[in-house]
Image (cartoon, rainbow, N blue to C red):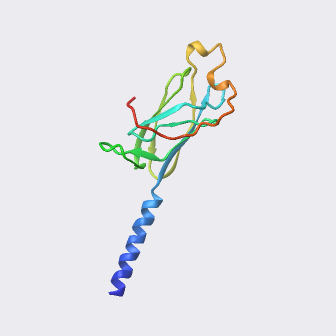
């Protein structure tokens, strides 16, 4: 009986370790064509994850997805995620990442200014003193 309980506990511990080892986090950085970080850009994905905003340094972090049909949130599951970054004054930026395990770095991505903004100061080039938190809301389609 003792061996059976010990074996069950060992298997349960191994399963729980495997679950925590598989946690996935998608992160990246968004900059302008001049290399300046783009803050407050909205980052959304398909399949749906939390909607987040880039921070002052242009970084974003996504670690939760929205469960289809329920709207509940859970850890990101492995798969290909289509990512769309948008901000007023810039053309939308779209790319995909293959999330397998651990932290998935989506690289440093460059947003291009809209044509009307090319000869003026782009929105992210103004100095902002406040920090914008990242965090979510519901998912909307592209």
Task: Give the residue displayed 60% in from the left and 15% down from the top.
Answer: 117
| Residue 78 percent across, percent down from the top left | 40, 49
Q: Is residue 72 above or below residue 127?
A: below
Q: Is residue 122 above or below residue 102?
A: above
Q: Toward which corner of the image does residue 14 lie, by quadrant? A: bottom left
Count of number-bearing discs: 0
Task: Give the residue displayed 43% in from the left and 36% down from the top.
Answer: 45
Query: Which quadrant of the figure contains the C terminus?
Result: top left
| Residue 4 percent across, percent down from the top left | 33, 82
Front residue (pair 136, 1): 136
Front residue (pair 59, 98): 59
Q: Toward which corner of the image does residue 88 lie, by quadrant? A: top right
Task: Give the residue displayed 55% in from the left and 17% down from the top.
Answer: 114
| Residue 16 percent across, percent down from the top left | 42, 65
Query: Which quadrant of the figure contains the N terminus?
Result: bottom left
Return the residue found at the far left: 69
Q: Is residue 91 above or below residue 75?
A: above
Q: Is residue 29 left or right of residue 2?
A: right
Q: Is residue 135 above or below residue 22?
A: above
Q: Is residue 115 left or right of residue 96?
A: right
Task: Give the residue displayed 58% in from the left and 12% down from the top.
Answer: 116
């Amino acid at each position: 009986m003792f061996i059976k309980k010990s074996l069950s506990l060992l298997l349960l511990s191994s399963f729980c370790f495997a679950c925590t080892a598989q946690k996935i986090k998608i992160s990246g950085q968004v900059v302008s064509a001049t290399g300046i970080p783009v803050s407050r850009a909205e980052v959304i994905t398909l399949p749906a994850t939390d909607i987040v905003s880039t921070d002052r340094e242009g970084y974003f972090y996504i670690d939760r997805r929205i469960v289809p049909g329920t709207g509940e949130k859970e850890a990101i599951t492995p798969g290909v995620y289509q990512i769309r970054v948008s901000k007023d004054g810039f053309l939308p930026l779209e790319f995909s990442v293959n999330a397998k395990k651990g932290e998935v770095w989506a690289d440093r991505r460059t947003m291009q200014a809209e044509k009307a903004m090319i000869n003026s100061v782009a929105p992210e080039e103004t100095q902002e003193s406040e920090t914008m938190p990242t965090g979510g809301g519901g998912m909307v389609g592209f």
